[in-house]
Image (cartoon, rainbow, N blue to C red):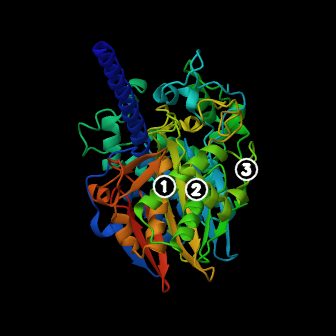
Amino acid sequence: MKKKIKNLFTLILLFLFIILKNNLVLADQIENYIEPEKQSNFDYGKSKRRSSETQIIVTANDYASEVGEKILDKGGNVADATVAIQLTLGLVEPQSSGIGGGTFITYYDNTKKKVFFYDGREKAPQNINQNIFLKNDGSKKKFFDAAVGGQSVGVPGTLEAIFKFHSDYGILKWKDIIEPVIDLAEKGFHPPPRLLNALNKDKFLFNINKNFLFNGVTNNPKKKIFNHEYSKTLKKISKDYRVFYEGSIARNITKKVGEYKNNNSLSESDLKNFSIKKKDALCFLLPSKVKICGPNLPSSGTICIVQVLKIIDYIKKNKEIELSDILDILDFVYYLREQFLADDTFVRVNIEKLTNIDFLIEGFSKYKAKKKSFLAEEILNSTSHFSVVDKFNNVVSVTSSIESTFGSRLFVNGFFLNNQLTDFSFKSINKNKSLIKNRVQGGKKPLSSMSPLIIFDPDNKFLMSIGSPGGKAIISYVSRVLIDYFYLNKTLATSIKSPNYIKINGLVFLEDNSLKTELNLKSKVTSLTSGIAIIVKKKEKFYGFADHRRDGTVR
């Protein structure tokens, strides 16, 4: 009898150990994708906040803010500034975004009083294998086995997006707004803190790239970086941007991707046939009569954030909002995202139903008892966000990405190629044999969380632009600030400095120990490095705020 009890006790201990181990692994996986890069160790002080009666810029890096300011001072508008800022970020913040990646642009045309968006999200090659991220035995590849190399590279959309935006609305000549970025690439720039952090910690970058322009930078951080390859690329693009999609640069991209055994059949025709159109932004009127506008699918950001705010608004009618309520709502919204959202040119998505308050409240009340599994492939996003208001009172909110830090790590013509295809589900079929909506398909765009929003007051006048980097945590970061501002009476300055939080698949992550006192549940304290950028209008004056956690500045 004693032996049986001893054996039973041993089995119980073994069972508890397995559960604990699995929870720790799960927590570490999620922590990876919500903390893509180390927090910056410096603060630009006053440059994190600024006000203006005419024009204002908030970007993720002061080099980009400065170039954008020069373009506006020359008489340019937000479309001109967007091109210069994005091309500069690709130079000085190459670990986060660039012409080798994708972009969502939300634009408010003050003359027409309308909001548009440009979908520059990457596409999968037409001939891609839907099982590209699976091993021979049908199990999922480890994330970096999938991300690093040619198989994860989608057709880049950033350049097409900013060119289309500029051709529709720009004032200055295309060549003239690229010239300052060419000049910076040739004269050199000092590596920003986040770039140094990223170079220091990346395990794959220097193994893949030999005779690399970033060699030795971490040992000599005060030395300037000269990206002459990027300068040559920009000179070609300034004369004819199509060289990127059907010229020498296109050939170099497909050649670089094809050099790897695990490539994804990216062809020159995939690049040549890539194009985008200006579309109406996706807009929602909240019960408070505040209107939120942003990108439509394949971005999940606008939909998910509106879902969060609608549920918050409903609950607040009956009780005070607590942090535990917000965390549960975020968890539920991430569940809806996983179950229902994908590229709507491939999958039918009923947005009206998914944002209906009756559907949301009924689903939320039933959801609390559910348990979910974490999709391990959805990790490690690296992204950038900026916003601009010009003297014509036009507004742009832009989020761009190459997905993981340094993307696929493939470097060609002075820029990194994205690994955006790892935003797809690695598997095509659920356990119940149903097809996964965000599965790999040729010509499809992977689901994104990027949320470049423009918000209007009850009189339909511009109130705010907001966005952040941070992978899937973008939804939590932006929601937190909007909840603070609209429902908890916090100022934007206070909110940005308040600690971040996220709950996803039942796991809670907090930025600060102080939040633990508000919660009666298990949680993990970790860095949650948002990069919130905000422009808000109050009494005919614009106020800009840049997140203290990153290198952003306001000009």
Inter-mark Cα distance, 1 to 2: 9 Å
Farthest bottom residue?
539
Residue at image mark 1: 328
Q: Residue at x 37, y 61 (%)?
A: 547
> Secondary structure beneath disc 2?
helix
What is the quadrant of the C terminus in the image? bottom left
What percent of the width, then of the height, locates residue 520?
35, 55
Q: Is residue 506 visible?
A: yes
Task: Say what amino acid the circle numbered 2 marks.
Answer: Phe
Callout 1 touching callout 2 (CB < 8 Å): yes
Give the residue type at disc 3: Val
Viewer-proximal residue among 319 and 150: 319
CA separation, marks 3 and 1?
A: 24 Å
* Quadrant, the N terminus: top left
Residues at discs 3 and 1 in contact (Cβ within 8 Å): no
Tell me the kind of residue under disc 1: Asp
Quadrant in the picture for residue 139: top right
Decide: is 456 above or below 480.
below
Q: Position of residue 237 (x, y in %)?
A: 59, 46
Q: Which mark is residue 364?
A: 2
Q: Earlier in the sequence, mark 3 or mark 1?
A: 1
Residue 444 in percent (x, y) is at 69, 39
- Contact flag, marks 3 and 2 (Cβ < 8 Å): no
Circle 2 Cα neighbour tier, 10 Å, few/some/many (<14 / 14–19 / ≥20) = some
Earlier in the chain: of badge 1 and badge 2, it is 1
What residue sits 63% from the left and 49% below the top? 120
Neighbourhood count class around disc 3 (C-alpha, 10 Å): few under 14, some 14–19, many 20 upward:
some
SS for callout 1: helix
> Which residue does the image show at 35% across and 57% down from the upper left?
519
Expressed as whole percent of the image width and height from the top left, the position of residue 447 reads 61, 44
Q: Which mark is residue 349?
A: 3
